[in-house]
Image (tube, grey):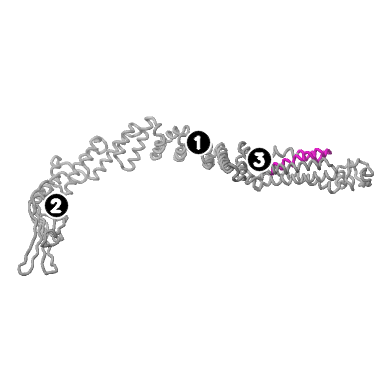
């Protein structure tokens, strides 16, 4: 076992009494050479402090290196994802260094120790430059352990080389340090850094590439390249998530990639795959949301057609139509008929019976479309009857008299039409319509026999119902004063220059309400100059009970009998000169032009 001089540290052969270099006597510790523990302790105790420090620093450096190697796998602290993604990058880079340190410590060939420590220095310098670029790696514990390992091991080797007076090792590390500084200067050159960024981009290290380009600021097109690298990073992340089946996350990344490369197509693909998953799981609504965003991706149209049919069969007609709307040019005839059926159902929900009938007829024999045509016509006819459009309702019911109680509705249209005419006061029209109906017919509580009797009992009102035109009358304004003063202007009414409509409304209990609706003209003032006369149109509408003369308000009265109508207006005003102005309108309507 070798021992060392306690004064100069020179290695000596076992059993030496004096140091061959300085002549210092060898201290005899009395160890048992057969005891390995004692041998190690003896060697440590006899080893000079500087040499012991060198070994301590190197061993500590190796421990730090091992920590740097295994930290990513232990996931201690914040570890850059991009570093871990390099698939063993730590191992490929640091394994030779670890082997070199071990060989340097336990082999007597110090040159090997020195060479591998030199390799550690170069590797460490490369890592420092590569990873210290802007935003490349932040607070990565392993990175700092690597720097510590490099510094400690290098210090240990240098101390040992100086102590052992190995000028070659010192020179070697001097050269290495110089090369390291040169590498730092060269690798921080914008051209070199630009090239490194490009190399990182070409090899798929987009995050690192973006950081390097960003650190170059406005150098050449570095800003544009940094933006492109950022997009590429999102694209890559999207591809990785898509490979894992995380399509929602992949879409988010592809959206951030802003159409970089085939991001737009990949978004469609992700939506398609999500849609297929939803469709397979029975989530039809979710499948629709995804597939309609897949647009023209291969296979999407076929899936949308299948989805639309499934939704139609489940009764979700609105969403089925949305699915079909995305593939309307690719549907075969059978699918088109299903789409027409869905449209008809939607129109039916909105009570648009005309459109519902149209599309159920287009649907042909799909599902219960033929029966639905009859149902929609039935509902449409009932709706028309509610709106008092009995003639239109009869036309609709013509084709479905054998459906439900359509035949009864058809007959009821005639009964209800007569009842409606009576309630509107069009007695002559009602009499004309009811003549062809049998007395036994009834509908909705209305009997044909009862309505015939009601019209017969009120025959005199049938003579009054209708449109009447004027046959005479006068519109007049006059001024009367003291001492027999009198002056006037007047307009004679020409035949048929005014008209009035009279409707006689009969209730079931025999009461009569007469509606008189028309316009007359009245003067508003008096003037000795004709041009200054002013008159206005006055609307007269009034409900009265039976024949006779009625004051309908606003200085107006109406006289009704079976021979016609008379409307009279008379208003008196006292002016500032104590004259009395009288405005009079008196019109007779004795010619009926239309019986209602």
SS class, disc 3: helix
User: Residue sitting at 68 percent across and 47 percent down?
Assistant: 141
Residue 339 point in image, percent of width and height: 37, 35
Which residue in the structure is indicated by mark 1? 265
User: Residue sitting at 16 percent across and 47 percent down?
Assistant: 422
Q: Could you say which is closer to the camera, residue 492 or residue 181? A: 181
Nearer to us: label 1 or label 2: 1
Nearer to us: label 1 or label 3: 3
Query: Which secondary structure class fits the magenta region best?
Result: helix
Residue 542 can be seen, yes or no: no
In this rendering, position of residue 130 left or right of residue 267:
right
SS class, disc 1: helix
In this rendering, position of residue 304 left or right of residue 186:
left
| Residue 510, numbered label | 2
Mark 3: few, some, or many residues within 10 Å (few <14, many ≥20)?
few
Q: Quadrant of the N terminus?
A: top right
């Amino acid at each position: 076992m070798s021992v060392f001089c306690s004064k100069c540290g020179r290695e000596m052969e076992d059993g030496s009494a004096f140091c061959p270099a300085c002549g210092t006597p060898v201290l005899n510790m009395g160890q048992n050479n057969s005891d390995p523990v004692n041998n190690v302790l003896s060697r440590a105790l006899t080893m000079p402090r500087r040499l012991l420090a060198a070994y301590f620093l190197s061993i500590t450096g190796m421990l730090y290196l091992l920590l740097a190697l295994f930290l990513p796998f232990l996931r201690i602290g914040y570890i850059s994802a991009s570093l871990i993604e390099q698939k063993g990058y730590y191992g490929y880079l640091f394994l030779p260094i670890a082997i070199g340190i071990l060989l340097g410590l336990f082999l007597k060939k110090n040159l090997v120790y020195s060479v591998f420590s030199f390799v550690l220095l170069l590797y460490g310098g490369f890592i420092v430059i590569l990873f210290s670029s802007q935003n490349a790696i932040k607070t990565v514990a392993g990175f700092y352990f690597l720097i510590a390992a490099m510094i400690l091991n290098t210090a240990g080797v240098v101390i040992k080389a100086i102590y052992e007076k190995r000028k070659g090792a010192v020179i070697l590390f001097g050269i290495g340090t110089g090369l390291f500084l040169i590498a730092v200067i060269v690798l921080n050159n914008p051209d070199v850094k630009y090239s490194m960024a490009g190399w990182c981009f070409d090899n798929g290290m987009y995050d690192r590439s973006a950081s390097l380009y960003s650190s170059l600021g406005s150098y050449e097109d570095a800003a544009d390249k940094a933006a492109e690298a950022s997009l590429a990073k999102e694209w890559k992340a999207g591809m990785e998530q898509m490979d894992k089946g995380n399509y929602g996350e992949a879409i988010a990344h592809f959206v951030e990639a802003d159409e970089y490369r085939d991001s737009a197509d990949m978004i469609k693909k992700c939506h398609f795959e999500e849609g297929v998953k939803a469709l397979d799981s029975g989530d039809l609504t979710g499948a629709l949301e995804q597939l309609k965003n897949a647009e023209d991706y291969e296979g999407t149209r076929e899936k949308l057609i299948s989805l639309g049919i499934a939704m139609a069969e489940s009764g979700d007609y609105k969403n089925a139509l949305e699915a079909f709307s995305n593939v309307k040019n690719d549907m075969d005839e059978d699918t088109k008929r299903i789409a027409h059926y869905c449209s008809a159902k939607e129109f039916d929900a909105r009570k648009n019976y005309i459109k519902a009938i149209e599309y159920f007829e287009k649907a042909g024999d799909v599902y219960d479309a033929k029966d639905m045509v009859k149902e929609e016509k039935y509902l449409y006819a009932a709706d028309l009857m509610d709106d008092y459009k009995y003639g239109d309702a009869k036309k609709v019911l013509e084709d479905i008299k054998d459906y439900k109680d359509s035949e009864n509705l058809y007959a009821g249209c005639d009964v209800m039409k007569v009842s409606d005419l009576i309630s509107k006061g069009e007695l002559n029209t009602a009499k004309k319509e009811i003549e062809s109906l049998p007395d036994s017919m009834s509908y909705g509580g209305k009997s044909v026999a009862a309505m015939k009797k009601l019209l017969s009992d009120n025959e005199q009102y049938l003579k009054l119902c209708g449109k009447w035109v004027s046959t005479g009358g006068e519109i007049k304004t006059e001024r009367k004063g003291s001492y027999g003063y009198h002056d006037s202007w007047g307009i004679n009414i020409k035949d048929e220059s005014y008209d009035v409509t009279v409707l006689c409304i009969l209730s079931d209990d025999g009461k009569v309400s007469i509606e008189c609706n028309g316009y007359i003209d009245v003067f508003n003032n008096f003037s000795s100059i004709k041009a200054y006369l002013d008159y206005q149109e006055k609307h007269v509408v009034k409900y009265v009970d039976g024949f006779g003369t009625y004051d309908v308000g606003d200085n107006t009265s109406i006289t009704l009998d079976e021979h016609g109508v008379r409307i009279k207006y008379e208003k008196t005003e006292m002016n500032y000169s104590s004259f009395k102005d009288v405005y009079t309108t008196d019109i007779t309507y004795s010619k009926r032009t239309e019986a209602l």
